Image (tube, grey):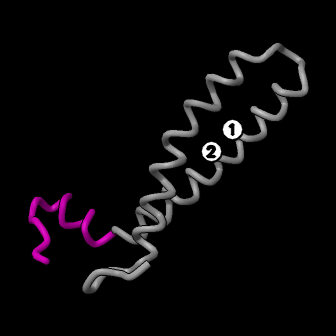
Amino acid sequence: MKASKGKSPKRSVVSITLFITFILLPLTGKMIQLVERGSDWEHVWVATHMLIGFVFTGFGIFHIIYNWSALKHYMKGKPKSE
């Protein structure tokens, strides 16, 4: 993945991963509701949901770290010139 001028490819990977996990979390949550209580499938879906939740949280932290300067500018009300 080639980074655009001055941007790290890490930011793109983090953003795409956050988007995918954001979509998957509600889907796995719904699957937990739909499967029979106590079944093996419920345990599989709960484990998957938890794993995706941990990935989402971790990448959310990286997202904040990689975009910290932009976030500071947003909080100050001054748009960052690129």
Q: Which residues are magenta?
A: 68-82
Placement of 49 over or under 20, stated as above or below: above
- The residue singled out by tag 2 in the image is 53
Against 36, residue 68 (above or below) is: below
Identify the residue shown where x is 64% and y is 46%: 52
Most common secondary structure along the magenta stretch: helix
Q: Position of residue 5 (x, y in %)?
A: 25, 85
Residue depicted at x 42% and y 60%: 15
Dot 1: what SS?
Answer: helix
Q: Which residue is mark 1?
A: 49
Q: Position of residue 81 (x, y in %)?
A: 10, 75
Q: Amino acid at mark 2?
A: Gly
Q: Are marks 2 and 1 in contact (CB under 8 Å)?
A: yes
| Coordinates of residue 25 in the picture (x, y in percent) | 58, 37
User: Dot 1 surroundings within 10 Å: few (below 14), some, or many (20 or more)?
Assistant: many
Q: Which mark is residue 36?
A: none
In this view, the residue in front, 78 or 33, is 33
Magenta-span inclusion, residue 71:
yes
Distance between the alpha carbons at the discs numbered 2 and 1: 6 Å
Q: Residues within 10 Å of mark 2 (few under 14, many from 20)?
A: some
Q: Quarter of the image for the C terminus: give it.
A: bottom left
Which amino acid, mark 1? His
Q: In the image, is residue 11 above or below residue 48?
A: below
At mark 2, the secondary structure is: helix
